[in-house]
Image (spheres, helix red, strand yellow):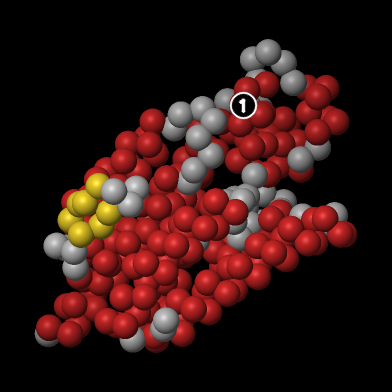
Amino acid sequence: MPPVVKNLLIINGLFFLGTLLLEEKFRINLTQILGLHFYKSALFEPHQLVSHLFMHGNFLHLFSNMFALWMFGNLMENVWGSQRFFVYYFVTGLGAALLHTLVIQFQYSELASQLDAATLNLVLKNDINALEQVATSSNIEQIKGLLSLLNIPTVGASGAVFGVLLAYGMFFPNNVVYVYFAIPLKSKYFVALYGAFELYAGFANNPGDNVAHFAHLGGMLFGYILIKTWDKKRRY
């Protein structure tokens, strides 16, 4: 196993264990500290742009990301070398965070425009007691929506992993991927269908869907741009 993939697997596993242990033993919520908050949130810190890539919501979230990283990242690191793969992984991870933040900004602006300045200020301060006094039937949904955007962090390596998946599909388009370990599909079609599904799910914005679909698309988008940039430099 190449070194970057191996160390990413180890680090993500250690962060997950650390999250569980700190919560159980010391009641420290590491997800709130290291997960990525919207930049207008009082909980936002610059380090979260990187640290959120090592945080996961549950074991299934961790396992699915790490399995995909192991499956597709091994080959891509061997093709590119460790240094280029390391750069690619974190550029796509940061690109995913950027696109996700732009989407949150749009949602935030839409909700904030429906509140008066005083109420919006209370939301930004996360003053729940004061908000309970000013909440009405006409603004309660906007207040709840804004509090959700500001207080719920984004976690996971999915954006970077989707970038790796895109690279695999571009470099090995005819390799077969077994969907659900049973359905054979060429990787170029698998990547295209997965990307189309993420785009649909992102715009559908179904209630209860807590997946950052546009972060996944951001990883793929920035991965495509970076690959084409490297390809152009090499060719010319």
Q: How many marks?
A: 1
Residue denoted by label 1: 142
* x and y percentages locating residue 18 in the rendered image: 72, 66
Horizontal placement of 103 versus 208: left or right?
A: left
Whether 147 is drawn above or below 207: the answer is below
Horizontal placement of 164 versus 189: left or right?
A: right
Whether 232 is drawn above or below 12: the answer is below
Q: Quadrant of the C terminus?
A: bottom left
Horizontal placement of 173 versus 1: left or right?
A: left
Residue drawn at (67%, 28%), measured in percent from left and top? 143
Whether 47 is drawn above or below 44: the answer is below
SS label for mark 1: helix
Q: Nearer the viewer, residue 124 or 212?
A: 212
* x and y percentages locating residue 84 in the rendered image: 35, 82
Q: Quadrant of residue 31?
A: bottom right
Q: Nearer the viewer, residue 112 or 71?
A: 71
Residue 16 visible, this angle: yes
Pick out the residue farthest to the top.
137
* x and y percentages locating residue 131 in the rendered image: 78, 28
Q: Quadrant of the N terminus?
A: bottom left
* x and y percentages locating residue 201 in the rendered image: 38, 36
Residue 45 visible, this angle: no
Residue drawn at (42%, 45%), measured in percent from left and top? 213
Residue drawn at (28%, 61%), measured in percent from left and top? 166
Amino acid type at mark 1: Gln
Residue drawn at (59%, 73%), measured in percent from left and top? 11
